[in-house]
Image (cartoon, helix red, strand yellow):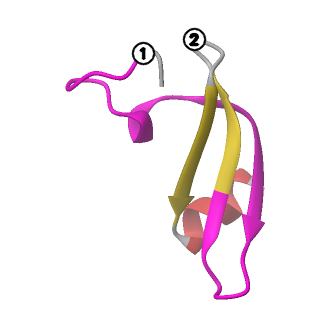
Amino acid sequence: MRDRDASRKPTMQTMLNPVVTKNDKGRYSAKGTCAKCGGNMFKFMSETDAKALM
């Protein structure tokens, strides 16, 4: 990520247009765009966080 540093980790940034998916092992993930720089973001998340984004 372009704007990654020690005080602002990717998991703390806002994701625009998230697309939440679940893989065959039951793990949730989200893909989207960084609200700050417009770069691509990807992160794994818990089921409760994924359902909150859906």
Q: Quadrant of residue 32?
A: top right
Above or below, 20 relative to 6: below
Side (left or right) of 7 relative to 31 = left
Q: How far apart in space, not on screen, are marks 1 and 2 (Cα)? A: 7 Å
The residue at which mark 1 appears reads as 3
Q: Quadrant of residue 36?
A: top right
Q: Which mark is residue 20?
A: none
Q: Residue at x 33, y 33 (%)?
A: 9
Q: Which residues are magenta?
A: 3-29
Given the image, on which type of amino acid does mark 1 rest? Asp
Residue 53 horizontal/vertical position (percent): 70, 52
Note whether 9 is above or below 42 in the view shown.
above
Mark found first going from the N terminus, 1 or 2 = 1
Instruction: Please give the name of the residue rendered at 47% of the width and 16% of the height, measured from the top-left corner.
Output: 2
**Measured along the vertical axis of the image, is residue 49 above or below residue 46?**
above
Q: Residue furthest top?
A: 37
At horizontal 27% and vertical 21% (from top left) the residue drawn is: 5
Residue 37: assigned label: 2
Q: Quadrant of residue 54?
A: bottom right
Give left or right: position of 18 versus 3. Answer: right
Mark 1–mark 2 CB contact (< 8 Å): yes
Where residue 52 appears, as percent x and y from the top left, is 66, 57
> Which of these two is toward me, 42 or 35?
42
Q: Secondary structure at mark 2?
A: loop
Residue, x 20% and y 26% (percent of image)?
A: 6
Q: Secondary structure at mark 1?
A: loop
